Amino acid sequence: MSNKSLQLYWKKNLRYLLILLSIWFFVSYGCGILFAEYLNQFSLGGFPLGFWFAQQGSIYVFVILIFVYVYLMNQLDKEFDVNED
Amino acid sequence: MEVQTWTLLIVGITFLLYIIVAIWARAGSTKEFYVAGGGVSPLANGMATAADWMSAASYLSMAGLISFMGYGGSQYLMGWTGGYVLLALMLAPYLRKFGKFTVPDFIGERYYSSQARLVALICAIFVSFTYVVGQMKGVGVAFARFLEVPFTTGILIGIGIVFFYAVLGGMKGITYTQVAQYCVLIFAFTVPAIFISLQMVGNPIPQIGMGGTLENGTYLLEKLDQLHTDLGFAAYTSMGMNDRVNLFFITAALMFGTAGLPHVIVRFFTVPKVRDARKSAGYALLFIALLYTTAPAVAAFARTNLIQTVSDKEYAEMPAWFTKWETAELLKFEDKNGDGRIQYLADASKNELVIDRDIMVLANPEIANLPSWVIALVVAGGLAAALSTAAGLLLVIATSVSHDLLKNYLKPNISERGELIAARIAIAVAVIGAGLAGMNPPGFVAEVVALAFGLAASSFFPAIILGIFDKRMNKEGAITGMIVGILFTTFYIIYFKPQLGGPGLPENYWFGIKPEGIGTLGMFLNLIVALVVSRMTAPPPEKVQQIVEDIRIPRGAGGAVDH
C-alpha cells in the first residue's frame, strides 16, 4: 500500500474516531452529568430524562457506537484494500 | 425444598459444568496457555470478556450501591461500560495487529526499552493482585453465608476450583469456562429482576419496567422520589446532593482505568483477526450492558420495596428475612423512641435502622417473596462472577511472571515446554497466594481497588494510546509520563485515604477531587509530560516508527507470535 493512501486511510479513521467519541462524550458526560439537572425537567415515560441518560441511555448508545464503528471500519478496510481476507 | 438444599444442588451442578468444560479445553502449548491459541470466536470471546470483567462487586454490590446512592450510582454504570468504547475504538484492533501476548510486551517493544517493560510488568502484577484478593474474599463470604461452612473452608473450595481449571487450561480453559460462567451469572441476575418487575409494575422487561407505573397509576420513580423526600433523603433521581465535579472525575477514572486494565486488554489477543477484535469488544459490551442496564432497575425496585416494607411498620411484624439478616448483623434495628415501630430516616439521630448495602442483591428475592430456587440461583451467579474474574486476573499474573519476567528478562532461551511448566507453576503460586491473602485480607482491600483503577488510568492507558496514535512518541516521553502519572496518583490516593494511613483531609482535596477520581488528573498529567518530553528528545528509531505504521492497518495480522 502506498504511503499516500495509507495516510488517507489513517485520516479517515481518525475522523470516524473524532465523531464517535464526541457522541460518547456527549451522552455520558454531557447528558448524564453536565446537563443532567436541566434535562431532568423533561421526562421519557416514567424517567426524568437526565436520569435515564445516566442509568440507561448512555449505555445503549455505547453499544451502538461500537457496532457502528465496526461497520464503518469494515467498509473502510475494503475501500482501501487493507481488509484481512 | 429448602433454600439450603437448592443452593447446594445448583452450585454443585454449575461447578461440575465448569470442570467438564475445563477438561475439554485444556491447553497444550504456550500459545494456547497465554492467548487460547488466538482462535476464539468473537462471540465467545465477548462472553468470556464480559464474565471476566463483571466481578463479585458488579454482581453483588453494585445494585446495592446504586440503591443507596440514587443518581450518584450512575458513576459506576457509565464508568464501567464507557471504557469499552475507548477499548474498541482506540486499543483493541491495534494491539491485536501488534500480535504479542501481553501489555508489557507492547510497552517494551514500542518503547524499545526493557526498563519500560519492567515498569509495565510491575504495574500489571500489582493491579491484578490487589483485584484478585478481593475476589477470593468474595468467594469465601458467599460460601460461608449460604453453605454455612466456615469462611476459610469457603476460600479453600474456591482455590481448589480455580486452581483446577486455570492450571490445567490456561487462557483456553479459562475462556471457555468463562463462557459458561457468563451464562450462569446473567441468567441468575435477570430472572429475579424479571419476577420483581412483573410483580411491581407488570412489565417483564426490568429496563422498561423501571419507568413503569405502579398499581395505583403513579410512576415507580416518582413514588420512590416521594418516599425519599418524605423520609428526609434527597430525591432518588435528582442529581441535587451529588457533586458534579466528582461524578465527572470518578466516571472518567473508571472509564480510562477499564481501558487500561491488563486483564481486559489481553482478551483481545485471543481472537483471530483485527476485525474480530473490534467486533468482540462490541459483543463484550453488549453482554455487559445486559447486566448493567438491569442493575439500576433492580436498585430502584429494591429500594422502593425495602422502604415500603419497613418504614414506620411494627418491628414485631417484620418478615422472616428481616430477622435472618439481623442475625448476620447486616441489618441493625434500635428502637430509639421506644414505640415498637421502625423509623427509617435520613436524620442519623432519629434513624433506627442501619442496612448494609451489600445485602440488597441477595436479599432482594426474599424481600419480594420469590421461590427458594431463585435465591439459590443468585448465589450460584455470584460465585460464577467471582470465580471468572479471579481466573482472568490470575492468568495475567502468571503470564507476567513466566513470559515477561522469565522468558523476556531472565532466561530468554527457555524452551517452550519449560515456559509452559513455568506458567503453570506461576499460576499455581498466584492462586494460593491470592487465596491466603483473601483469607486474611488487609482491611484496605476496597481502598486499594481505587488505586488499581487510578494506576491503570494514569499509567497504561496514556502509554498505549500514545504508542499507537503518536508516531513521534519515544521512550523518554513514555517512561517519564508513566512515572509521573503513577507517582502523582499513588501519592494523592495514599495521602487522602485515611484507611491507608494518609493524613490528608477532605477540605484539602485538589479542586475538590476525591481520591477515587484522581486517576483522571493523573492521566492528563501523564499525557502532557509525555508529549513535552518526547518533543525535546530524539525521535524513536526508524524500525519502531515502522511498527507504528504497521499496526495501523489491519491486513497481515497473523496469530499472536512469540519472539
Image (tube, coloured by chain):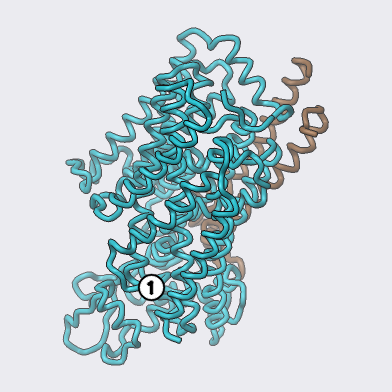
Chain colours: A brown, B cyan
Q: Residue furthest top?
A: B538
- Camera-nearest residue between B373 and B500: B373
Q: Which residue is mark 1?
A: B228
Is B93 rendered above or below residue B203? above
Residue B219 x/y as whole percent: 54, 77
Instruction: Depth check: give the residue in front, B548 or B392.
Output: B392
Q: Nearer the viewer, residue B74 or B487?
A: B487
Which residue is depicted at the point 56% across and 48% down?
Answer: B26
- In the image, taking residue B270 as reference, residue B389 lies left or right, namely left
Tag 1 secondary structure: helix
Residue B412 against residue B420 in the figure, above or below: above
Q: Is residue B289 visible?
A: no
Q: Residues within 10 Å of mark 1 (few under 14, many from 20)?
A: many
Q: Position of residue B62 (x, y in %)?
A: 43, 61
Q: Along the horizontal axis of the image, is B277 left or right of B539?
A: right
Amino acid type of the residue that numbered disc 1 sits on in the rendered structure: His
Q: Quadrant of residue B180?
A: bottom right
Q: What is the chain letter for disc 1?
A: B
Look at the image and tell me whether residue B426 can be seen. yes
Task: Please tell me which residue is depicted at 48% across the width and 37% down the height of the picture.
Answer: B260
Q: Is residue B63 positioned above or below B484 on the image? A: below
**Image spot of residue A78 (x, y percent):** 81, 33
Q: Quadrant of the C terminus of chain B?
A: top right
